[in-house]
Image: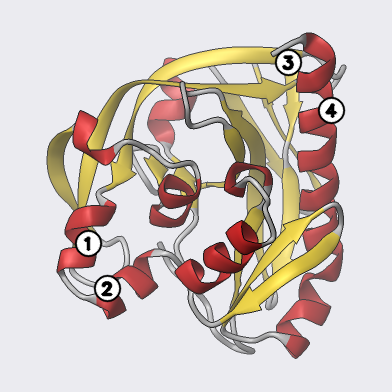
């Protein structure tokens, strides 16, 4: 089964984008996530967490992330995040996995500038996404092709 | 959600995502360091903060989950995660 990815050229740099739908209860909505093989974990961005109305008080804190924006970024663990992808034949597939989400209330407490910076960072698809869901990642920049397969 | 609604959601999401990819160079010229909200292949709100743009989306009566909000980097600005 193949899931096509989008290659986007932003200011001369290319990003690999995965469109997905959050099917998390009461947080349904669209997400554009960036494939980031440099990140061990999948992280729901501050912007997407706000937009999807993630219930921040329902989750426990996880170890803050270093390297995401300036300084350390507080995050929450969502143990059973649910989402859906559409395969290249147009069929939706449902997934469930633990992810980290930017802890927006804590970030906000650190000041508006910190929150402004955090909302510039998109949702990141980390290596755990590939491992937990048995995906292989193929990227052919010269052929302008990228997809997930399992 | 029934299958047809799901299919429509994906179609809309992918169309808006394609729209952003196709227009990103133009957006970078017109809206550097701004956030833009996209729905139905149109810019529906622009602003210099995420929450400001989100407020405009809500004022239009739109469901935030049905809208993509994108930060447009300035020329030469490369964001590392």
Work out whether disc 2 and disc 1 sit on a shared chain.
Answer: yes
Where is B11 relative to A108, above or below?
above
Q: Give the residue displayed 72% in from the left and 82% down from the top.
A: B28
Q: In this view, does B13 lie to the left or right of A21?
A: right
Q: Give the residue displayed 80% in from the left and 20% down from the top.
A: B5
Label 3–label 4 contact, CB within 8 A: no
Q: Which structural element holds mark 1?
A: helix
Q: Mark 1 points at which residue?
A: A107
Q: How far apart are marks 4 and 2 (CA)?
A: 36 Å
Label 4–label 2 contact, CB within 8 A: no
Work out whether disc 4 and disc 2 sit on a shared chain.
Answer: no
Q: Give the residue displayed 85% in from the left and 19% down from the top.
A: A90
Q: Give the residue displayed 83% in from the left and 80% down from the top.
A: B26
Q: How far apart are marks 3 and 4 (CA)?
A: 11 Å
Q: Mark 2 points at which residue?
A: A114
Q: Which structural element holds mark 4?
A: helix
Q: Name the residue under label 3.
A: A92
Mark 3, chain letter? A
Image quadrant where residue A89 sits: top right
Q: Name the N-terminal-most of marks 3 and 2.
A: 3
Where is B59 relative to A99, above or below?
below
């Amino acid at each position: 089964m193949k899931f096509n990815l989008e290659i986007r050229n932003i200011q001369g740099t290319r990003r690999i984008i995965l469109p997905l739908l959050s099917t998390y209860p009461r947080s349904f909505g669209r997400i554009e996530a960036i494939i980031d093989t440099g990140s061990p974990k999948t992280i729901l961005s501050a912007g997407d967490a706000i937009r999807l109305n993630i219930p921040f008080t329902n989750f426990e804190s996880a170890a803050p992330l270093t390297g995401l924006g300036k300084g350390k970024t507080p995050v929450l663990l969502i143990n059973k995040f649910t989402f859906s992808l559409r395969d290249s034949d147009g069929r939706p597939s449902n997934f469930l996995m633990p992810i980290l989400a930017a802890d927006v209330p804590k970030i906000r407490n650190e000041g508006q500038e910190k929150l402004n910076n955090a909302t510039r960072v998109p949702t990141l698809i980390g290596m755990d996404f590939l491992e937990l869901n048995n995906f292989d990642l193929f990227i052919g920049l010269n052929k302008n092709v990228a997809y997930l397969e399992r | 959600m029934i299958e047809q609604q799901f299919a429509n959601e994906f179609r809309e999401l992918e169309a808006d995502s394609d729209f952003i990819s196709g227009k990103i160079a133009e957006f970078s010229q017109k809206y550097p360091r701004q956030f833009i909200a996209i729905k139905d292949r149109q810019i529906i709100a622009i602003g210099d903060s995420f929450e400001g743009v989100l407020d405009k989306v809500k004022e239009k009566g739109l469901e935030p989950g049905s809208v993509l909000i994108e930060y447009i980097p300035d020329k030469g600005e490369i964001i590392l995660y």
